[in-house]
Amino acid sequence: MSAPFHIDGERSKASRNRRAQTPCFIASCALLLSMQSAFCQATPSAALPALAPFAASGGATLHPAWHLGGLPDNKAPLSVFEATTLNGETVLALRTQASYGVLTHAWQGQAPEFLSWRWRLEQPLRQADIKSKAGDDIALKVCVMLDQPLADIPFLQRSVLALARSVSGQDLPSATLCYLWDSRYPAGTSGNNAYSARVRYIVLNGTETATGQWVSQRRNIAADFALLFGQESAALPPVTAVAVGADSDNTQGSSLGYLAQLRWEP
């Protein structure tokens, strides 16, 4: 689960500038950079709030609304995302092999109340540890990017966000809420990404959930934003994108999971 960018706010400006030139800093921008690329290619209509299905018509290829992104300069192989049939249902397969990847769907506007989906973990990442930088990989994640007002963000984090935007040349999102299926921590575990306080997560399925079975999720985005970002912003900001991802580039592991029926619900 490599973070979009480092937000620690504890180092000097000079240190942050040095870090901005390192592969680690560049790699940490990958999720947001891939999302920004998606914005440039597909800007959704406000009159069409639905998320596109993962599979295009016919089910053999990915829908063009979903854009694949990886690490800059091919720092790691791309994770594999493909539409496939499982028990008669067309689903998205997410495969990693010491790889990184994220599928991003540009979607701009105020979120409906709920985001729902079904997911299934077949092969977990046993060595991953979302609380450490060295182990920051995840086999299944669903993320919502939000346009949080800069004035609400703590000064040091806002400064590093400005640095990341300057280095990348992209208007990187100011808040990202991620839902995880993790194999080390139990459901309900939440916190900041190991690299970035602008990315925060909730483990929905963890050590208590068996692999090889479908689990349905339905999340109230406003409530989850309030839980993780509520001390900064009182209201839910507009959504800028929805993403799904899987990565094992830090731990050099391999994983397999499935996602289906990702959609907004009133």
Image (cartoon, rainbow, N blue to C red):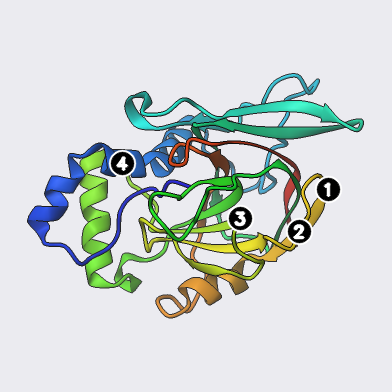
Q: Quadrant of residue 80?
A: top right
Q: Which residue is mark 4?
A: 170
Across and down, in percent, residue 65 comes to 60, 32
Whether tag 1 and tag 2 are in contact, CB under 8 A, the answer is yes
Which residue type carries mark 4? Answer: Gln
Across and down, in percent, residue 103 comes to 56, 36
Closest to the observer, 203 or 217: 203
Whether tag 3 and tag 4 are in contact, CB under 8 A, the answer is no
Which residue type carries mark 3? Answer: Leu
Q: Which residue is mark 3?
A: 180
Q: Which residue is mark 1?
A: 213
Q: Residue placed at 43% from the left, 75% from the top? A: 233
Whether tag 3 and tag 2 are in contact, CB under 8 A, the answer is no
Closest to the observer, 224 or 249: 249
Is residue 174 toward the left or the right of residue 98 in the image?
left
Q: Residue placed at 61% from the left, 62% from the top? A: 203
Q: Secondary structure at mark 4?
A: loop
Q: Which residue is mark 2?
A: 209
Q: Residue placed at 34% from the left, 30% from the top? A: 72
Across and down, in percent, residue 250 comes to 43, 41
Q: Secondary structure at mark 1?
A: loop
First in sequence, mark 3 or 4: give its number. 4
Cα gap from disc 3 to disc 4, whole angstroms: 26 Å
Q: Secondary structure at mark 2?
A: loop
Is residue 235 toward the left or the right of residue 46 in the image?
left
